[in-house]
Amino acid sequence: MKTYESSKIRNVGIVAHGGAGKTSLTESLLFNVGAITRLGKVDDGNTAMDYLPEEIKRKITISTAMAPVEWNGYKINILDTPGYSDFIGDVIGTLRVVDSLIFLVCAVSGVEVQTEIIWDYADEKNIPRIVYVNKMDRENANFYNVLSQLQSTFSGKHIIPIQLPIGAEDNFKGIIDLINMKALDFSTSGKIAETDIPAEYQDDAATYRLNLVEAAAEGDDELLMKYLEGEELSTEEIIQGLKIGINQGKVVPVLCGSALKNIATSPLLDIIIDYLPSPTSNISDDKDLSKEPFSALVFKTVADPYVGKINYLRVFSGSLKADSVVYNVNKENDEKISQLFIMTGKNQQTVAEAKPGDIVALTKLQTATTGDTLTTKGNPQTLEGIEFPSPTLTVAVQPKSKGDEDKLSNAISRLLEEDPTIRLEKNTETRETLLSGMGEIHLDIVVERLQRKFGVEVVTSDPKIPYRETIKIAANNIEGKHKKQSGGHGQYGHVFINLEPNYESEFEFHETIFGGAVPKQYIPAVEKGIREAMPEGILAGYPVTNVKVTLTDGSYHPVDSSEMAFKIAAAIAFKKALEKANPVLLEPYMNVEVSVPEQFMGDIIGDFNSKRGRILGMEPKGKYQLIKACAPLAEMYRYAIDLKSITQGRGSFKMSFAQYEEVPQHIAEKIIENARNAKLEKSS
């Protein structure tokens, strides 16, 4: 593929709710330009874009794939994104580097949840967009119902059709082009017949044409004056006005067709070129990006066990050539560029150079990861990075085979490079390795990839809750004595301690020894003995916290006393004191912020009440409501699943540690019983 100037490049993301047909549309566009010789199908697992084994197995897109196509002297970089919320990270990375979006909406299902969520993301960045109403050939397809739903759901923009369907369901055969007022008939395989608009569609076409002309006029002041004075706008002026309105984010044109049957998909290529912005559309005329210092952003990384890393990047200024050296601003090191590739799905094709605005792939970079800026050493500018959402669902993982711990750690480190929405941490209290992701499907696929790519089989389970133990009352003058005689020097340590609740810190140690009852050299051993006893409480074996210990008295033997003897005596006293101080179980509570549409607030509040949570406050956040609450971690590990169910996927949340609180007695009794049974099983 040749090198294209910035003005001849279009970077377009295809986005939608899962199942709307993004991959099928990309497949049709590739076929129409001759980039592929046959139309693959998602159900058959043979499309160019969904090539990962996990995608073929599930028949869904889980990773953004790239498809550059050449059309009438232009290069269109198509990025086919996932449609399920578990993979929103890939969508967010794509939004950072595209100049426009094609929203696919199913002609049967209409506007679905993920469409609304991505639309909001696109609004934040004011990304120009068009809507393609797909699956017009399906039973119950209704273009006008979907159009009405689009206009009511996204009322802040001028959403207007520039095409109308000819027929629907089995009778869908073409479209009416409202700009040129012509009918395009696709009923003859492989051919497009341009005809006059059929009589039965002429009234609708005239009405929607007026709406289109009005929207075009509003895009430009001169056109608006001409329109208001009653003058007719030319086709060129309509195109000009629509283009301005689209690029300003005020106008959203609506098209229609059937990607699976390749009906009315080819006109989309001309729409992309004629109406959607180039990388330089919003750059002032006196600024030539090609002459600016080189800068590029890595927006996606793929970890291949054979090739190594593949980094996808967009060039924002300057140009990038093969056999060159660039500077990684984030990692502060040079990166050697050997070859540049354009990717069509998994297939690579080398190119000599990438101009500003182009998207290419690089291999064998040493340290570059998603979000890094590549530039020249003398121009260490840092491009705006990518803010990925925090993971919402956590599981404990351990390798199936003993001894694979290091192998698992290395494999997940590789996966972290390509998926910034994964987190891996070691919980020192529960001694578990915790893997976090965006949802059940996401984590299932991570587990599958660990086995397929790196040969590591793992077992997942619900994480253990890091409970703790503390006391509610003081226990004073508790004795601990360790005395042992076994020939030669014996062992002797003897202490008295006071134990009391401590609400200021996890642990305090004091001593009030008088007259050398416990020699000074043994006092540190007493504190050490208590500290070493604290990790295992007497109720269920959880760490003890929020206590104050005071060494008050004791005795020693001039020959048999030792640091070890006093450590043991202190531990004995500490355990006895715990029993007398009304020990209780503590559990971690989390601060939770939930963002939901207002109609779900009652259900969310009710759910928190059922989870032993407390509502702390509520406040508006744009068109959503922000609910602040506090709830026990034991009830929140699977909240991502619960929230998705309650809000039909429209809610989001973030969570952070708040404090430890006492576990209700009826729940504590079950936890203690389970812990004791587990201990018995382990010892038997």
Image: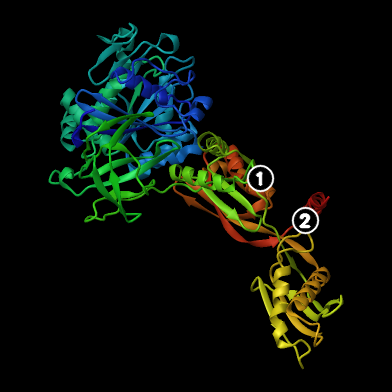
Q: Position of residue 12 (x, y in %)?
A: 32, 33
Q: Is residue 288 above or below residue 207?
A: below
Q: Is residue 436 above or below residue 168?
A: below
Residue 346 vs residue 601: left or right?
left
Q: What's under tag 2, amino acid-wise?
A: Ala
Q: Position of residue 15 (x, y in %)?
A: 40, 32
Q: Which mark is residue 462?
A: 1
Q: Position of residue 623 (x, y in %)?
A: 46, 45
**The quadrant where residue 259 appears:** top left
Q: How is the image coloured?
A: rainbow
Q: Quickly name the residue at label 2.
A: 668
Q: Position of residue 452 (x, y in %)?
A: 53, 33
> Which label lies toward us, 1 or 2?
1
Q: Which mark is residue 260?
A: none
Name the secondary structure under disc 2.
Answer: helix
Residue 356 vs residue 673: left or right?
left
Local crowd size for mark 2, using a 10 Å CA cut-off: few (<14), some (14–19), many (≥20): some
Position of the N terminus by quadrant: top left
Res. 141 in view: yes
Foreground pick, 207 / 164: 164
**The quadrant where residue 205 appears:** top left
Local crowd size for mark 1, using a 10 Å CA cut-off: few (<14), some (14–19), many (≥20): few
- Marker count (numbered): 2
Q: Is residue 2 above or below residue 680?
A: above
Residue 639 vs residue 368: left or right?
right
Foreground pick, 466 / 99: 466
Q: What's under tag 1, amino acid-wise?
A: Asp
Name the residue rendered at 21%, 42% in the picture.
319
Residue 355 vs residue 595: left or right?
left
